Amino acid sequence: MTEAAATHRERPRAVPAGNVRVWDPLVRLIHWGVVAGVVLNAALLEDDGKAHEVVGYVVLGFVLVRLIWGLVGTTHARFSAFPPNPLAALRHLAGLLRGHRRVHLSHNPAGALMAYNLWATLIGLAATGYMMGTPRYFGMEWVEELHEGLFAWLMISVALHIAAVLLDSWLTRVPLLRAMITGRKRLPPDAGPGR
Amino acid sequence: MKKLLLAAGLAASLPAVALALSPGDTLGTIADEIRASLTEQGWDVRKLEMDDGRFEAYAVMGTQMVEVYVDPATGKVVKVEADD
Amino acid sequence: MSTPGRARTDERRAIALAAVILLQALTALFFLGDVIADLLHDGALEDIHMWLEAMAAVALIGGVVFLMIELRRVMNRMSLLDRSMRAARGEMAEVIDSFFTDWGLTPSERDVALLVLKGIDNEAIAQLRGTAPGTVRAQCTAIYAKAGVDGRAQLFSVFMEELLASDD
């Protein structure tokens, strides 16, 4: 508490402390909509039913809107705020392990890769799912196996995603789950400079 | 023959495949027989496997896609699922 | 300056916009899928039904684009509000700082004075700083003397006047 007076002067203006609006309602609705869709199709609906198909296309719709929003949306939702950069992602992870606590307003570089991975996987699932309903690919083993393979990859990615979010939240002391619900990131008062 | 079936199939408002395959049709008691019977009728058999004690065949003719379930004991079709 | 009420209306509006964007986008996708399937199948849109679906898809996509622009505008307005409120707070921090310097407060006295301004009572201040309440009382006496005020309330009013005056 004794740093309070000192940090008032030292806190860099680039990263505001307190609650910052980061995730707009569209980003959040899409995120949780996709979660619901994945849970439905992965665990609750029959694989060969009509509902499974419909949910699959709904999730595809969500992802497509998110991609458009990534081009024309709010600052933190845009791709430019979290460009795909594997080197930066590795640096971020190494930094975390070494105790660096750099705060990112949008997705951090590792989270960015996960986002792109999840979107690509979901699109792949929708594409193979669609193909299975066309005369050309109906009943083709390789399409079905690709669909199942992508699903397995999705499950691995989701597990990794959840673990990473929890770990990052714990290490940086920024509650990420709450941020994706309320839209605001509560930044710790001694936050270092970041984007 | 194929075109006639196609035309007849597309013209019908009920599952068109009712004209080509119906429950009760005899296809065969072993995989090869079933595959041969379907191919004779003009179907492109994409997949044939055992599912829940029944033969399940995925077949395509033109734009029609069907899943045909055959009882291995009787050799007859027990269910036809037409994908719209 | 806009009131918190305005912010709350904007929040609700933003959520509503997002929901409608998604609904329209999904519906557009549905019609678009139908139209594309028909085009692939027949090479052209055969009946009026398909033309209507195509029109609906175009209209819906137009709606989505328009609403996205609107949503962005609402979000920008909200963060502008956030920024000006933060700036006000930031400026206040600088004002407080400069007063403390003018009064010649020691580092410890600055800390205590800030906590007093935050409305924390002496007991809690002592706990936070790991000192005795008596120490805090002594520090407060020094602070009030240096600031030329009688006590807490007057200390507050020094800065309240600053806050109110800066609006001119």
Image (tube, coloured by chain):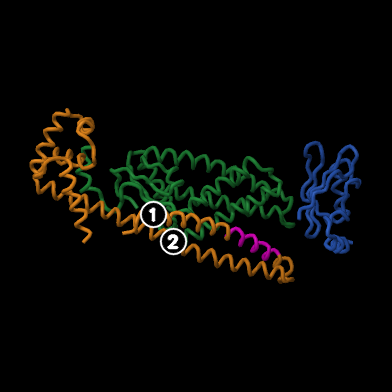
Chain colours: A green, B blue, C orange
Please give the label number shown on residue C133.
none
Instruction: Give me the C-alpha separation between circle 2 and circle 1.
Output: 19 Å
Q: Which residue is mark 2?
A: C72
Which chain hosts label 1? C
Q: Residue at x 17, y 29 (%)?
A: C133
| Residue kind at label 1, given as amino acid type | Gly
Would you identify the image quadrant in which residue B44 lies? bottom right
Q: Position of residue A111 (x, y in %)?
A: 44, 47
Q: Position of residue B49 (x, y in %)?
A: 78, 42
Quarter of the picture containing the N terminus of chain A is top left
Query: Tag 2's secondary structure?
Result: helix
Circle 2: is it few (<14), some (14-19), or many (20+) Cα within 10 Å? some
| Residue kind at label 2, given as amino acid type | Arg
Q: Position of residue C85 (x, y in %)?
A: 30, 54
Of circles 2 and 1, the one toward us is: 1
Q: Which residue is mark 1?
A: C5
**Which contiguous range is marked in magenta?**
C25-37
Circle 1: is it few (<14), some (14-19), or many (20+) Cα within 10 Å? few
Residue C33 forms part of the magenta stretch: yes
Taking the image as shown, residue A170 lies to the left or right of residue A26, namely left
